[in-house]
Amino acid sequence: MTVLTVPVIAPVLPALEIDKITFGAILMMLIETALITPQVKLNIFTVKGIVNEPLSFIIKSVIPFVLIFAFGIILVFMFPGLALWLPS
């Protein structure tokens, strides 16, 4: 996902005044959110292979994590300094 997304969006980042590290943090959070939501489900299938639970139970268990990721994405998007706070 990163290999397909970055070459298309990276040239536009300076015009939008978005820092590359902030973009990388947001992109990784979006990719992880995609991997645990039912549209892509790659991580959900991995968990299904490890535990003996129905797929519907696993999908319901992922909902809090999706909400936390969404909240984090909104926070980093609104306050880009959060992505740069820990490295600095």
Image (tube, rainbow, N blue to C red):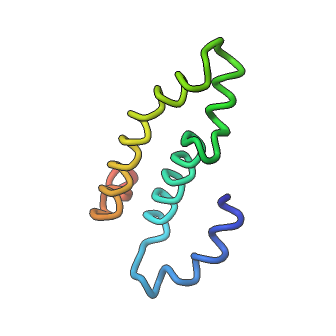
Q: Residue at x 43, y 72 (%)?
A: 19
In the image, 62 versus 88, the foreground residue is 62
Residue 38, compared with residue 10, is above or below; it is: above
**Residue under the point 58% across and 41% down:** 38
Identify which residue is drawn at 43% across, 35% down.
63
Residue toward you, 82 or 35: 35
Quick check: 10 left or right of 7? left
Relative to 52, 66 lies left or right: left
Q: How many marks?
A: 0
Relative to 2, 18 lies left or right: left
Residue with the most extreme top position: 52
In the rendered image, residue 51, in percent from the top left (x then y), is placed at 64, 14
Residue 86 coordinates in the image, percent (x, y): 35, 49
In the current view of this chain or complex, which residue is farthest to the bottom?
A: 15
Of the 4 image quadrants, the one containing the C terminus is bottom left
- Residue 43, above or below 5: above
User: In x, y percent, where is residue 74?
Assistant: 33, 57
Screen quadrant of the N terminus:
bottom right
With respect to residue 79, does 49 lie above or below?
above
Q: Residue at x 52, y 59 (%)?
A: 27
